[in-house]
Image (cartoon, rainbow, N blue to C red):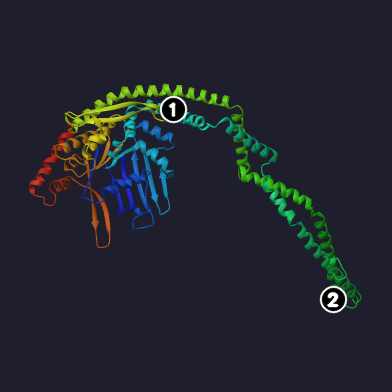
Amino acid sequence: MLVNLHVKNFAIIDEIDVDFGDRLNILTGETGAGKSIIIGSINIALGGRVSSEMIGNNGDNAMVELVFQVEDDSVIAALEELGVETEDGQIVISRRITANRSVNKINGESVSVSTIKKVAAYLIDIHGQHEHQSLLKKEYHMEVLDRYIGDEAGEIKDEIKVLYGKYSAIQRELDSDNLTPEERERQLSFMIYERDEIENANIQQGEEEELAEEVRKLSYSARIMENLSSVRELICGSSDSCEDYVGRALREITEIADIDDKIGLLREELCEIEDLIVGFDHSLKDYMDSVIYDESEIREKEQRLDLIRSCQRKYGSTYVEIKQYYDDLCDKIKKYEDFEVYRQELKDQRDEIEQKLDRLCDRLSELRHASAGKLEVEIIDTLEDLNFEKVRFEIAINRLDSFTSKGREEVEFLVAPNPGTSLNPLAKVASGGELSRIMLAIKSVFAGVDNIGTLIFDEIDTGISGRTAQKVSEKMAAIASKHQVLCITHLAQIAAMADTHFIIQKNVTSDDTKTCIERIDDNQIEEELARMLGGATITETVISNAREMKEQANKLKNRL
């Protein structure tokens, strides 16, 4: 169950910290108080999309944190398979949203949004106020039926999806090869030309980079030799060189070195200079001897580099890409050289997969037909509990002419909500309120068979009132006897069923607006129910009605 919600600096929420109870948690408040923001923050914590515009005015980031307590061993095992370890049965999911990104964590460890969504699927089911529109889509009808069937349907659908992917790929390949023999021959000739060009180039891994560096160095060798020759000429290569002038100076200073000891020291320094010049000359000569300037070698390497880069332009910018292109080319040449054999092999593969798909789809169809009748009965019973008198509900399963990734049939819910009307698709006959109740019926059926700990209903009461609202409240209480339920409602009949009641309010000042949430006690609950019943004017009679409504709700819950 969802133990705690902590939201900070999100939209008009400054900071809230809510501890939820088990069973039925009711959230009420005036229109516009921020009830949808509360549910929205939970959705975002569970991986929903969020805009940076939702960050509040008290900092540059928003934070939402959910604390779950998990008791079901099968759920704990499923989470462990996802790499999520519970700590004393507790899981903490948090998202911190900034202008550029979000930081997502489970039990303090960073995770991806996709991981959060996978984990959330085992913990919570959220029914938003517009979700009942999904009932108008046939895809959702199939999802409901297959979920009712259970794991076997899921496993078969996984196999079908993989096989259908292979089947479709083979069929696309067969359909794409509709060239005439002449066109195929022309393509084969061109492919052989490309293959031979790549083979003759015989490009080696890393060769382009190595050649480019060699050509760069060789292209500078002429300039290097020219400049170094000038340097050698200046240092020691002529009568006006540095070496010659130092030699003359040394002879001049030698003639007077014996006159003064200090002059002798200067002579020694000049000797060292001469030795340095001679040593430099030797080093310079050795380097110049090592520099090879061969125009024919440069031209040869440049031509090789041009060939490699030409292949890169045609077949791939890297060695790996060219190698992949070559391998694909060889496969296609082989296919075209013995085309009929290749097509027959494809057809044999397709036929083999088709046989497997036939068996799997037939088995899935058997499961669907066997379970559809049971699900129909459960949904009809629940709809009657929700004030659908003499309703008829049918799950139509229609076989398709071709395979899909979900089998070879489509599923559609048909309903006749009133006596004397014929069965029709939901989109043609169901109003908004009826769709809400049908969705609640489906949720109610699954609440009895699955192990999701928390269900959230955001204004499931859309379009209903009176006796129907009372029936919905009773069904909500029944669901809450087995699951934790969070429900946002505008109807006093539903709110009266609360085991834990929260009121959401919007506090407006001259320069700020904030949403807050508060758990209320019995006296406050009567006042809130009276507000929901009486509107602007709350009389003693309205308060008395609210008190009686709460007492009746408590008696009904005690019988569940």
Mark number, residue 262: 2
Work out whether residue 105 or residue 286 is closer to the camera in this orientation and state it. 286
Residue depicted at 55% across the width and 31% down the height = 180
Residue 444 image offset from top left, x and y in percent: 26, 32
Q: Are marks 2 and 1 in contact (CB under 8 Å)?
A: no
Q: Quadrant of the N terminus?
A: top left
Quarter where residue 161 is shown:
top left
Residue depicted at 88% across the width and 72% down the height = 250
Q: Residues within 10 Å of mark 2 (few under 14, many from 20)?
A: few
Residue 326 image offset from top left, x and y in percent: 62, 37
SS type, badge 1: helix
Report if residue 482 is visible in the image: no
Report if residue 139 is visible in the image: yes
Horizontal side of 45 relative to 440 (left or right) equals: right
* Foreground label between 2 and 1: 1
Q: Residues within 10 Å of mark 1 (few under 14, many from 20)?
A: some
Q: Amino acid at mark 2?
A: Lys
Quarter where residue 153 is shown:
top left
Q: Quadrant of the C terminus?
A: top left
User: Above or below — where is 545 with respect to 332?
Assistant: below
Measure the alpha-carbon separation of dots 2 and 1.
Answer: 100 Å
Work out whether residue 471 or residue 500 is closer to the camera in this orientation and state it. 471
Mark number, residue 159: 1
SS type, badge 2: helix
Q: Amino acid at mark 1?
A: Glu
Residue 52 image offset from top left, x and y in percent: 38, 53
Residue 343 image offset from top left, x and y in percent: 54, 26
Q: Earlier in the sequence, mark 2 or mark 1?
A: 1
Work out whether residue 541 or residue 4 is closer to the camera in this orientation and state it. 541
Work out whether residue 371 or residue 125 is closer to the camera in this orientation and state it. 371
